Amino acid sequence: MNKFKYYFILLITTVSLFSCSKDNNTAEIVPPRDYAVQYATDLNDIEEYLKNYYIEDVSPDVDTKITKIPTGGTQPSIFSYLNSPTFPKLLSREVKLHDITYKLYYLVLREGTGTSPSNVDEIYTTYRGEYLTTTKVDAVTTQTTTKFEEWIYEPQKANLFGYIRGWKEIFPQFKTGNNTSNLDGTVSHTGFGAGVMFIPSGLAYYASGNASIPAYAPLIFSFKLYEMQRLDHEYAISGQSTLPTPDGIMSFQEDLDGDGYVWTKGELPTGAINPDDTDKDGIPDFLDVDDDGDGYGTKIEITKNGVVYPFAAIPSCDGNTTNPARIKKHLDKNCY
């Protein structure tokens, strides 16, 4: 049987900024800043913010107000909650990208009581987005935040696969809550995860900016995580169209190393081997229609008599369905 493997192509456009020459009005190409240099600036600015602002108020609905500590004030800074054993707690994740290791801070106000999404699931969230501006004049540092987007009245669906790296890293650290439909048609949300993430520009929009966001701006998102939906991401490219071709296995179930994340090759550190790519063809299993590269599509290998096996019941080549250490047949190149 011939196999057609469709490659999901991630196009990364190198962004250049343009300035006008005073001499001849011709466009002068200004290359993007060095990632490591810009990250050092962003990290310093973010930590400055964390050390000089405090949580003024957290409402019963986990709406958060963050305010600058006044001169002589004794309010505990956000940074004082670093690795706190209780909520609120300030935590951080290491993200290896662009040949550097980012420190990505996030504030946990409430973890949530439900299920954590993977970094490619669809979430239902409300949020407020701001960008951080830091200026220094005569050795005096001034920081301001500017709101660029707010979605707080009705949860918005967001497929994390297509969002900025900061969101993809942080939302899986939280959990959903409980949702109750009321007689008046409204929905009540309880126990949802809530927090604030502080994103260096290299994990956001970097040199390109976005609409009302300036280039090289660190971002701050206050958010709530209400619900999530698992997705099956395989696609086929036909001409200029992208057609869903799900293989019957949810993308979060194709997380082979069990870390809660699946990445494309371009999202990994330079030279890294993707642990979630069975046949090492450069396409992670959650986008690959033939995970083991044996020439037989994954969906065919997990189907019997027209019925797709439940994920937990996919057998090994010898038919075993109970041994947790078995190699399921769609991941075994020698099994058809």
Image (cartoon, grey):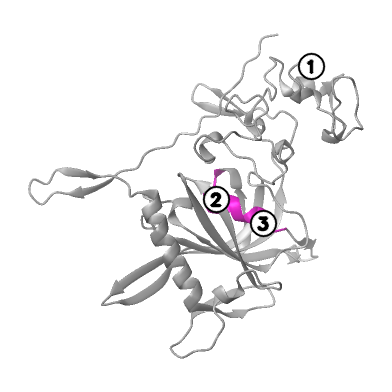
Image coordinates of residue 132 in percent, x first then y, are: 42, 66
Give the structural element (helix, strand or loop) at label 3.
helix
Disc number lying in front (2 or 3): 2
Image coordinates of residue 308 in percent, x first then y, are: 82, 27
What residue is pinned by disc 2? 95
Image coordinates of residue 306 in percent, x first then y, are: 84, 21
Give the structural element (helix, strand or loop) at label 2.
strand
Magenta residue check for 168: yes
User: In the image, which residues are magenta?
Assistant: 162-175
First along the sequence among labels 1 and 2 = 2
Report whether 323 appears left or right of 163: right
Q: Amino acid at mark 1?
A: Cys
Residue lying at 13% horizontally and 49% vertically, measured from the top left: 21
Question: Mark 1 and mark 3: span between their CA atoms?
Answer: 36 Å
Foreground pick, 275 / 71: 275
Q: Amino acid at mark 3?
A: Gln
Residue lying at 55% horizontally and 62% vertically, measured from the top left: 105
Q: Quadrant of the N terminus?
A: top right
What residue is pinned by disc 3? 173
First along the sequence among labels 1 and 3 = 3
* Residue neighbourhood size for the residue with mark 3, other residues' Cα within 10 Å, grouped as few (<14), some (14–19), many (≥20): some
Residue lying at 85% horizontally and 24% vertically, measured from the top left: 316
Disc number lying in front (1 or 2): 2
| Dominant SS in magenta | helix
Image coordinates of residue 191 in percent, x first then y, are: 76, 66
Give the structural element (helix, strand or loop) at label 1.
loop
Q: Up-down: is 32 above or below 270?
A: below
Question: Mark 1 and mark 2: span between their CA atoms?
Answer: 36 Å
Residue 148 seen in the current view: yes
First along the sequence among labels 2 and 3 = 2
What residue is pinned by disc 1? 335
